Image (tube, rainbow, N blue to C red):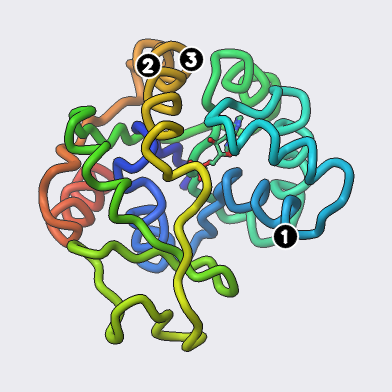
Amino acid sequence: MKLIFLGAPGAGKGTQAARISAALGIPAISTGDIIREAIKTGSPLGQQFKSYTDAGKLVPDELVVALLQDRLEKPDCQKGFILDGFPRTIEQAKFLDNTDLVIDRVIDIEVADEKIVKRMGGRRFCPQCQKTYHVEYSKPKKEGICDTCNIPLSIREDDKPETVLNRLEVYHRQTEPLVEYYKDKLAVVDGTRTPDEITDLILEVLKA
Ligand code: AMP
């Protein structure tokens, strides 16, 4: 099963990708996570990535495609995968078209912009294990502390309010055209339901 999860930043793609990954036994691949890992190393390439992510802009297609290509060659992708945050441009979608990978379904998790802004303001993450939390919807057991690593949670630079508005603008302009591009494989899921309901909706779609 080869899946793409589409949706605005903060729509819940990462949360659902992790759940569906566990349910189906296929890896969830987040280009955002791969990029954040590269930034953490402090390498020149990582520093280049940081200038884009901090501004809420997309990393250039050729760089992201190279990262993804590398990841897709790992043996765990043989049975299938979930792409979370890729493709984000028509150019990136064309890269996939030019491989021998056949995407089975594209799941679009829809949430209105106003809700996204509210959600992202409360988003937190663990700088060590990268697990994400939310001050209202997905609280850690101890306020502000990662359940697994027991260290203080952080706010992603690109979850800060001014960057969020930028990211939404970029999403509408560069990524939303993919909804039309993938219309034959598309299933739209209401991202305002509870996380459990959304997981069930996606699993229903995949069974059909
Ligand atoms: P995410 O965690 O998916 O929201 O990604 C965080 C940031 O990484 C984005 O705002 C972009 O700057 C960058 N990024 C992640 N995936 C891509 C992609 N497929 N193409 C370009 N930039 C990306």
Residue 41 location, quadrant: bottom right
Residue 112 % position (x, y): 18, 29
Report which residue position mark 1 lands on: 75
Q: Ligand 1 closer than 8 Å to the CB at disc 2? A: no
Dot 3 or dot 1, earlier in sequence: 1
Q: Which mark is residue 174?
A: 3
The disc at residue 35 is none
Residue assigned mark 2: 172
Q: Pointers 3 and 1 in contact (CB under 8 A)?
A: no
Task: Inspect this view and state whether residue 89 appears.
Answer: yes
Q: Taking 46 as reference, is 183 left or right?
A: left
Q: Residues within 10 Å of mark 3 (few under 14, many from 20)?
A: some
Of label 1 and label 2, which has the lower sequence position? 1
Q: Nearer the viewer, residue 203 or 14?
A: 14
Q: Which quarter shows the C terminus?
A: top left
Q: Amino acid at mark 1?
A: Pro
The residue type indicated by label 3 comes to: Gln
Q: Quadrant of residue 117?
A: top left
Label 2 sits on what residue type?
His
How far apart are the two marked residues, 1 and 2, measured between alpha carbons?
A: 34 Å
Q: Is residue 80 above or below residue 170?
A: below
Asked if residue 151 is positioned above or below residue 137 in the image, the reply reads below
**Disc 3 from disc 2: Cα separation:** 6 Å
Tell me the quadrant of ligand 1: top right
Res. 24 visible in picture: no
User: SS for tag 3?
Assistant: helix
Q: Are marks 3 and 2 in contact (CB under 8 Å)?
A: yes
Q: Are marks 1 and 2 in contact (CB under 8 Å)?
A: no
Alpha-carbon span between mark 3 and mark 1: 31 Å
Q: Looking at the image, which residue is at 40% across and 68% down?
A: 22
Q: Position of residue 124 (x, y in %)?
A: 39, 61
